[in-house]
């Protein structure tokens, strides 16, 4: 008799049903994406040139990495981006903490994106290594600019040395320019040597100030004023307008005491309010005039060439030092040699030449 099974028997197992999903497929996908192999340098470059922000951010992270294997890849990306760089206006902004740099950059940046520009905001802040980046807090302050799809805000790279932070920022400029940003704003904290570093990577250097009670000129480092292409007195609003006007006059007088600039640009002074936006468009007008002059007499490009040479030498300095101090033999000898110097057993010069000899022998 043929086995005609028309109904399931209790002796037979039912067709199984798949167990309920314990892990959501979305989460799995997320994790898999995370594990995805890192994009190649060619993929990164393609992404950057296509103005893809994720690719840009990834490339900047690569540049900022201290991992030696990343350095090779970062250099590949930068070299491929170089022919597409160099076509933005680079603006440095400095001023003591509290003067209103972040608020100013938010207002100024919004004004520029309103003109159809693509604005990248970078920062050089060596202290951020310790304080975990004051600009991180700023990023929340630049609420409007953060949301603007034509703006890109990148907190300061961390690094043990200003030279290191500055080099990374310099390379980030190249990446941003290749990524289609035509206006690069670099903020620096108004302390230490970071102004010099920023001044060496921008076309236009803006010093932000606020008015005091008649003591405007006190406490400003002469060198910083000398570097400025414009001094802008911020917070010229409310009761402060008159004082700001007065400060502007004072600074104007002081600026005349400095020697003329190679570019033939005569530094300007003005007032503005980052809150009411009064005077903000005028700052851009000044920069446009500056560009017209310095492009016309070629000093803009001359300056950039000089800056490139400067950064080449800076990078050599930095890499040599890094290599020296990371050398295993030197690391072994450094502490004991320092002690010997401290105990007057050996002169500092003899000690230095001993260590250098050990280094170059390798
Ligand atoms: N009244 C007035 N306050 C301002 C202006 N710009 C900035 N501030 C305020 O000054 C403080 C410091 O500003 P911030 O942008 O953080 O300064 P930063 O440290 O130079 O970046 C904040 O409380 C701002 O709201 C301005 O133009 N007018
Ligand atoms: Mg700030």
Image: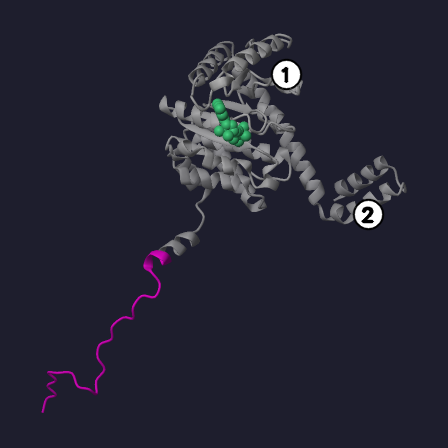
Residue 189, relative to residue 40: is it above or below? Answer: above
The region drawn magenta spans: 1-28
Q: Is residue 273 visible to us here?
A: yes
Q: Secondary structure at mark 1?
A: loop
- Residue 155 in picture, x, y percent from top left: 51, 36
| Residue on which the image places disc 1 | 215
Indicate which disc, 2 or 1, sits on the residue closer to the N terminus.
1
**Which residue corresponds to the image point at 50% horizontal and 31% vertical from the top-left?**
122
| The N terminus lies in quadrant | bottom left
Q: CA distance from mark 2 to mark 1?
A: 50 Å
What's the magenta bit mostly, secondary-structure-wise? loop
Foreground of the two, 255 or 322:
255
Q: Is residue 24 magenta?
A: yes
| The C terminus lies in quadrant | top right
- Residue 43 in picture, x, y percent from top left: 41, 41
| Residue on which the image places disc 2 | 336
């Amino acid at each position: 008799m043929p086995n005609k099974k028309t109904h399931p028997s209790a002796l037979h197992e039912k067709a199984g049903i798949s167990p309920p999903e314990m892990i959501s497929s979305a989460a799995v996908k997320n994790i898999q994406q995370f594990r995805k192999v890192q994009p190649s340098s060619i993929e990164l470059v393609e992404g950057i040139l296509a103005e893809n922000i994720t690719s840009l951010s990834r490339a900047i992270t690569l540049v900022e990495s201290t991992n030696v294997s990343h350095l090779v890849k970062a250099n590949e990306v930068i070299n491929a981006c170089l022919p597409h760089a160099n076509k933005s206006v680079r603006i440095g902004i400095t001023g003591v903490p509290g003067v209103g740099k972040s608020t100013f950059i938010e207002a100024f940046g919004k004004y520029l994106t309103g003109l159809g520009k693509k604005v990248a905001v970078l920062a050089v802040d060596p202290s951020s290594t310790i304080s975990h980046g004051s600009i991180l807090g700023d990023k929340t302050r630049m609420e409007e600019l953060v949301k603007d799809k034509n703006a890109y805000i990148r907190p300061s790279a961390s690094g043990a040395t200003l030279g290191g932070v500055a080099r990374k920022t310099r390379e980030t400029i190249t990446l941003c320019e290749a990524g289609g940003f035509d206006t690069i704003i670099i903020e620096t904290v108004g302390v230490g040597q970071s102004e010099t570093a920023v001044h060496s990577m921008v076309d236009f250097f803006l010093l932000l100030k606020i008015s005091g009670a008649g003591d405007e000129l006190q406490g400003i480092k002469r060198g910083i004023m000398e570097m400025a292409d414009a001094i802008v007195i911020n917070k010229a609003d409310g009761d402060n307008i008159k004082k700001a006007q007065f400060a502007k006059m004072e600074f104007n007088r002081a600026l005349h005491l400095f020697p003329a600039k190679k570019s033939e640009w005569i530094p300007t002074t003005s007032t503005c309010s980052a809150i009411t936006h009064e005077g903000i468009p005028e700052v851009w007008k000044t920069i446009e005039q500056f560009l017209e002059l310095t492009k016309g007499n070629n000093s803009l490009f001359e300056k950039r060439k000089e800056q490139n040479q400067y950064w080449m030498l800076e990078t050599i300095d930095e890499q040599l030092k890094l290599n020296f101090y990371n050398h295993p033999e030197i690391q072994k000898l450094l502490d004991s040699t320092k002690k010997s110097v401290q105990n007057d057993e050996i002169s500092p010069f003899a000690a230095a030449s001993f260590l250098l000899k050990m280094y170059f022998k390798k």
